[in-house]
Structures are given as C-alpha cells and as structure tokens.
Image (spheres, grey):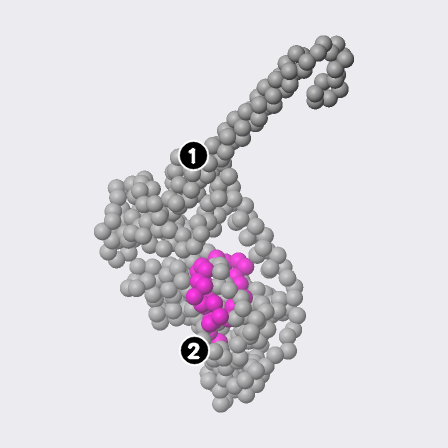
Amino acid sequence: MPVPKYGYAAPGYRGRRNVKLSAWLRIVMVNAVALGIYLVVSYHIRELRGAKADQRTLVEHGHMDNMAEEPGPVECHVEEHAEYDGDQLSWGFGHSTNDAAGCCDKCKQDSRCHLWSWCAAEGGCGPNHSRGACWTKRFASNPDFRNITGARGPEVPFTSGACFASNRRWEKQAAIAAEQDSEEVRLVELAADDSQPLVYFDVAIKGKPAGRMTFVLFTKDAPRAAENYRLLFSGERGIVPEGKRGAGKPWSFEGVKFYRIYDRFICQSGAEVDTPLLGNSSTFKDDPGSLQLVHDRKGLLSIANAGPDTNSAHFSIMMGPFPHNDKHYGVFGELVSGWDVVQAVNLLARGVQGNELKGSPDAVIVAAGQLRRGVPVNVTSGM
C-alpha cells in the first residue's frame, strides 16, 4: 500500500486520488482562514484610522484633549457669573452678540477657540464694554478643561463657557468637581500642618468688615521670609527702634492698606518698615528655596521687592498662576481660607483705568495675628 506524500495514512486510505483531494481541501481551508484574518484585521484598522481622524479634527479645533471615545457634537459648557482667563483671540470691544449662545457660536466658528466670556450686565462691564460684548479665548498651553481659571462669584458681570464634545460634558464636570474637592482637601491638610505657622488678616473694605484671610507660611522652603512675615503678623517685636526705617511705628501689618490692587493679578500690601529679622541690614536675603517655588495657582503669598535681596515687609497675594514671576519673587506662603475676602478686595480694581487701583484707602488690614507658631526657625537677615 503506497504511503501518502505528506504523512501517515489515515484510516480507510484508498490511494493517491484521495491524497490529492485531501491536500486540496487543506489548501482551501488555510486560504479561507487567512482571508478571514485579513478581513477582521482590515476592519479594525479602518475603524481605528477613522476614530483617530475624528480625534485629530477635534484636537485641531481645540474641542478635545486626549479623548478615548468617539466624540459627539461640540457644544458649550456655560457658567454664569464667571469670567474665564485665557489668551485673547477676539476682544469685546467691537465684537458683540445678542446673547451668550451667540458668543458660544462665535467660539465654535474659530478653530483656535476653547473659551469665551460674554458681558451679561445691563449696565455693561467696565469702560467701553457694553452688554453683549463677546471675548473669545484659548488656553495659553495645552487645553485643560479641568483647570479653567478666572473670576467667579455673584458680583462677576460675565457669563463664560468652554467648548468640548457633548458626550464628554458630564465627565468633564465630574473631573472639575473632583479636582476642586482634591484642592480643598490639600488646603485643609496644609492648614493642619503643625510644623508651619498659621497667621491671619482681618480686612475691612470701605469701612465695613469684609472677613478674615488665613495663611500658612512655608518655613521649610522659605525659612527667612516666613519668619520675617510671621513677626509682622504677630507684632511680637514691638516698636521699630530709632535708626531704622519706620522708627516709632509698630512692627506689624495692623492698619496697613492694600495699596496696589490689579484686577485678576495681585492684591499688594506691606508696612513701611525695615525687616524685623535680627541682623545689620534693613532688608533680608532671598531664600534659595522660595525662588524655586512657582507661581502656579491662586492664593500664593509672593514677596514684593525692588530686586534680588531687597526684601523687607511687602508682599502680594496672587489671583492665579503667573509664571513670569517665577525666580524673581520668592513664594513664602499660601491662603488656606478666605478666598472670598481676597476676591472682594481685588474687585475694587475692576473697571478703573487700566484695571489697576493704586494708593486707595478702601481695603485695610484692621487686625493681624498668629494662630499657631509652628516649629521655630533660627534665621537672621543674612546680609
């Protein structure tokens, strides 16, 4: 009995004709399987390419940031009494719409636009900006709808929005809420850190109590600055002696004004005295660690000075992230409660010429103090 060409004979082997038929069937089966694999793989490749093409289109139009699912139609998330920050694409002056939806549509029509702000106040929103003025904006860097900064509150005369795919809206809002909750937890934990000083201002606006601002001072990263400002919060050094700037005045922030308020940028204040740190200088030296901290969020305390190593008793409360201040002005603390009070002070500058209020008596620190000493640090002015 002849042996089949490609292996051992199967039961019932009847000769070479059956061998040829068996070989032909195997070839047909192999080709069928290969064709099936090719069709399945081709289908998935087409699907993947189509999804990526849709994704690229939305990314190019600024309405999507690394979405994993197929996006829906682009729509606007709307927030009343809010004015979002962003790089201006079109200005409100000369660009008006009948309603907020029209401003949203204007943003959708510009492939670069992520954000928009619309003046909703009947009386307008400052000089030369009447009701209906529409600003379109984009993120300064990569689009991040979870971190939209700006002014918020019942006194803000704008309605703002962000454009992104509709089937991502609730996910985005949930992410925003989760990030806000995470930030609140971070600030609570920072306030509870017994190793760092906890200090406060009580503020009056136009003669009426506005509330309290509470801060933590960063003795670990900025020991010299933190101790300098702690002494000015607590007032424990008493009266400035003869021979120093401010002689006869208390070494304290109590009674000083916010003398420079720049809308959505800073609230600046300080005492006209030399540093209360021990040493032979009227100013104190920069902390290397404080210059490494970045101005990446609202509520940070930043030293106000006239250049390197000229620090004394002046400071700014930051209204948002301002990286151009990095490495020029040391960060030495952070607000842990009282953001509404900071906003109320900052709003005094809105609508004035240049949105900058200088030398006004309207916002005053009526009391300053220390709620917790923290771990003592042994520093001098270092000059």
Whole-percent x, y for residue 161 in the image: 38, 45
Residue 220 visible in image: yes
Residue 122 falls left or right of residue 83: left
Secondary structure type for disc 2: loop
Whole-percent x, y for residue 379 in the image: 61, 79
Does the magenta portion include 333?
yes
Quadrant position of residue 72: top left
Point out which mark residue 334 bears.
none
Q: Residues within 10 Å of mark 2 (few under 14, many from 20)?
A: few
The N terminus - image quarter:
top right
Kindly report the distance in space between the C-alpha atoms of the residues bearing marks 2 and 1.
Answer: 52 Å
Residue at the disc numbered 1: 72
Whole-percent x, y for residue 45 in the image: 50, 33
In this view, the residue in front, 382 or 242, is 382
Q: Is residue 339 shown above or below 77?
A: below
Amino acid under label 2? Ala
Amino acid under label 1? Gly
Point out which mark residue 306 bears.
2
Which residue is at a point 63% across and 14% down the rendered structure image? Answer: 21
Residue 81 visible in image: no
- Give the mark toward the camera: 2 or 1: 1
Which residue is at a point 75% across and 19% down the rendered structure image? Answer: 8
- The magenta segment: 313-339
In this view, the residue in front, 121 or 219, is 219
In this view, the residue in front, 366 or 270, is 270
Does the magenta portion include 177?
no
All told, the count of numbered labels is 2
Which residue is at a point 31% across and 42% down the rendered structure image? Answer: 109
Which residue is at a point 49% across and 90% down the rendered structure image? Answer: 243
The C terminus - image quarter:
bottom right
